[in-house]
Amino acid sequence: MVPTPGTPAAIAEPLSYPGEPPPTSILFVSGCSEDHHPKLELRSGRRLGQASLDRQKETPEEARRSATLNTALHRLNKIGVNHRVPVVAYGSNANVAQLTEKFRDYPDPVAIPVVKATIGAVDIAYSAHMSEHTYIPVTLIARDGAATEVFVLFLDDDEVTHLSKSEPNYRLARFAGSAYPLELESGERLDSYYVYVSRHGVLHLGGHPRFFTGSGASQPTILEEVLAHISALEGLADVPRGAEQFVERAESDDELRMLVSEVLREQYSSPMFPQPQETSAERCLRYGAIVSS
């Protein structure tokens, strides 16, 4: 169960969570191999729909012939970016292999802009739960002075609904750019945008939030740290402390995963933000209505 070379999906290899994000903004296109999604080149002073594509990649002919992102989307029979919902991806949703797995059973081919961005006053920390795929996932937390690199997925309504179904432990919440400024790599700022935030709060170990960034950020490290904290608790004394051994056992033991999540939520959790208001695809604003510069 140790991570294999490359960037596997955490669904398949829990200890690889969250996986590597793409090195640049891309257009994620169904059917492309991991390193052949066309690169998006955003320019200062231009709207996202005017981003150019790296047409040397092995993408559908309709996309290769396109000069701009919007043109590529239209030639692939997809809606343009103005009508798409900006959803922040900061964990495994920014990993191409994970996106491929999550949209594998989607009824239609997808073409999703995946755009590099930075959020202010927000950081990434571990969530106080264990996922059904046996890893400790991350969530966002308010943190003054932080500037965190993320990606933004620009999704149509059906894609938002589909992705939300893969996130039962998260609520889709609207964030205000005035409180937590979001800037695309082109310099464009969004007045508001959408984020999946954990329903379980932020993981606290040793009295402090366990941030994802910095030393010891790998999944085996955080998992073994969690196991060391909870192993003395009733019902968990015989739980393996090694990450690989734990995953091998917990993948086939729903009760164990649920017990770990319950312990983390009840004894090692703290709030992240003022209670965010949950929303749905039907109520989301589109990029064309919320870009400010």
Image: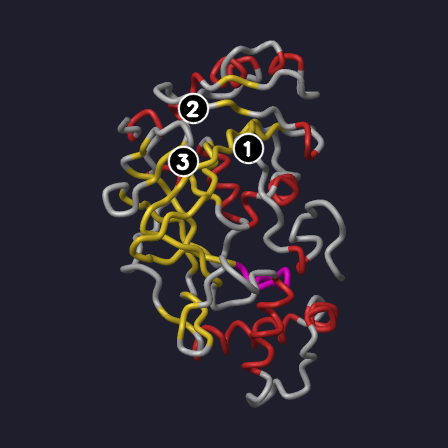
Whether residue 169 sits left or right of residue 250 in the image: it is left
Direction front: furthest residue: 215
- The residue carrying mark 3 is 86
Question: Magenta segment, which residues?
Answer: 131-137
- Residue 147 lies in magenta, yes or no? no
Amino acid carrying mark 3 in the image: Pro
Residue 98, x across and y down, in percent: 62, 45
Q: Which residue is mark 2?
A: 81
Q: Is residue 210 above or below residue 102?
A: below
Instruction: From the image, tell me which residue sits under label 1.
Output: 24
Question: Compared to 168, does 109 lie above or below?
Answer: above
Tell me which amino acid carries mark 1: Thr
Q: Element type at marker 3?
A: strand
Q: Of residues 280 and 227, which is closer to you in this image? A: 227
Query: CB atoms at circles 3 and 2 under 8 Å apart?
Result: no
Spatial separation of the CA atoms under disc 3 and disc 2: 9 Å
- Distance (Cα) linking label 1 and label 3: 17 Å
The C terminus: image quadrant: top left
Q: Secondary structure at mark 2?
A: helix
